[in-house]
Image (cartoon, coloured by chain):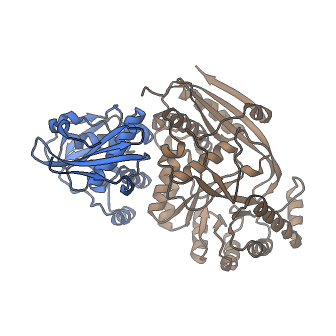
Chain colours: A blue, B brown
Amino acid sequence: MALSRRVAAANLPMAAPVSIAHTHVHSLRLACGAEALVARVRIADGSDGFGFTLGMEAAVARDMAAWDALGRSKGVPLFALLGGPYRKRINLVKDDLSTIPPDWTALRKDVLAGRHELLRIDPFAWGSVEMVQTIAAVANAFDLSIVLLAPNAHSWEIQYCAALAATLKGGDTRIVVRSDPPFSSISVSERPGTGIDWSLEPSFSTIQWQN
Amino acid sequence: MAKLGISSIHLTRVSIPLTMVHAGSMYVIQKTERTVVELILENGVTGLGETWGTPEVYALAQRFARDWLGRDALDRTALREATLGKSNHDNKSGRNGRATLAGLDLAAWDATARSLKMSLAELIGARRRESFDVVSTLPAAILPRVVSRKELTDHLDLLSNTRLVVDFALEQVRKSGFRSFKLKSAAHSPEWDWKLLNELCEAIPGARIRFDPNANYGAATATELCRRLDPLGLEFFEDPTGELEGIARLKAAVKTPVATNMWVVKDEHLVPAIRRQAVDVVLGDLCMWGGIDAWRRMARVAHAYGLKPALHSVYETGIATVANLHLASALAEVEYPNDSGLHFLSSDVLAEPQEVKDGAMRLPTGPGLGVTLDREKLNKLTLETSEIHR
């Protein structure tokens, strides 16, 4: 592991309604050669959850891990914590169009001004489940749908986008990748938490988590 | 976790006397009618909900409940679509449909939260606050009994009667420490309202006072009155006139914030209100908005565009009152105190008294709403009941 650090729970800006016992964030070399930040959040009842990002911002991994821990603790998938799924299968398409930069002020103004037909969001750039849910509420009010970008087309990214996309209203909701998609659609996992299959990266099991 | 199958739904329509006559521009009443919902899961957990108690809503609740049997309480999206359809166009039951859904929806959220051993606030988003300020309604006039409109207007023509309302407000301060008030207006006399609001501000310095004529003043009269009231620094003018265009023009003419619970009451009202800059506060009623998910979305959108979401209420039992507390606790977007009429009910249906102390109510602890029905009290208040099961 290139990096292992302990983060004080009190400093975490997490929106998941959980009491955090502690958090670790590790850097992990993936099979494709890219580096990911992988977070483990342990909540008060001892349940662990995991999150990741192939970007630089660990907060998104911690937020994902907190929601994952809550879902695992309660034995329900993410969509059940957020109110229920609008769909159980999400289309995956290649798309080169740019996503909306994570600038909330600009997004609100542009939506009001009618500058968007579809909200193209990279959830890893926007940072949290709550932020995506807030964008989804705005999209719903303005009759817009959301497209989620899996920026590196990594399987974990696609699975996380599917977990989020399940909870988004709108007929055009789909996941986009920049290269030819590995499959045309993905089922939303019914497993507790985010439903990400961590075994897809063998190096994940080698992480030495601190207790 | 396996799905949380709904095995039966019990509905009880209750009539609860109020401790005094409540008068406004839309009513002179001394009772409230509500429908109490008990949603029983196959795992034995019961969730509580509440909605309006009109015969129309009660009948709709029976119909909707039949469609919910066997479905999964974890999947509130599917429950909503089974009841009102996928789009607003599909909702053939209008406002009554949304209110009916809200009562059943609350019971589903409560049953889910209890099954997951989470408080309702946590399931909605977070348990951010343990107590929340609530608002005491002030009737438009203090009346000895339910009176005709003519008797009400005769009473309001005698301006010295404003003193009765001021004394009543002071009693609320002494008894429960209220800091926030909603003055209902019969919209009969701007002079009455102007005099009374001045007297209230003088008698209770620092009180947050909202003024609610339920849109029964014409736009010109309302604007003139609200301009005169501006220097008082009221918390907000609630539906001083209508409709959206009228209230927008009034808002542009005053400094005091303007709120509505009449013209922005469903999803498709929100964007026009934002574009028109028609209001400052969306005083959303959980029943009118059609349940927790719709209310939560409204709060997020309102906040995103600089409007403040707040919780409206009429004369609910402890069930809906506590639900409003959970919403206010969960959503950081809620800043204004919650409306509440529970302390005017002569009896509640809950076993645990929900008291107002120092002007605030505490969030119950425990899973879900954190409250239990008192069957004996419920039975005494019951007008009719129905049990829907497979």
Residue B149: % across, % down: 85, 58
In the picture, the quarter occupied by the C terminus of chain A is top left
Residue B191: % across, % down: 79, 75
Residue drawn 59% across the image and 41% down it: B369
In this view, which residue lies farthest toward the front? A211
Residue drawn 32% across the image and 59% down it: A116
Q: Is residue A65 left or right of residue B295?
A: left
Locate residue A47: give its quadrant.
top left
- Residue closer to the observer: A210 or A169: A210
In this view, which residue lies farthest toward the left? A33
Seen in the picture, residue B328 relative to B275 is either above or below; the reply is above
Residue A111: % across, % down: 37, 61
**Residue A73 seen in the current view:** yes
In this view, which residue lies farthest toward the top? B390
Q: Is residue A176 left or right of residue B143?
A: left
Query: How many discs mark residues in the rendered view?
Result: 0
Q: Is residue B147 left or right of residue A99?
A: right
- Residue closer to the observer: B31 or B58: B31
Residue drawn 74% across the image and 58% down it: B176
**Residue A86 seen in the current view:** no
- Residue closer to the observer: B239 or B1: B1
Seen in the picture, residue B287 relative to B311 is either above or below; the reply is above
Residue B389: % across, % down: 60, 22
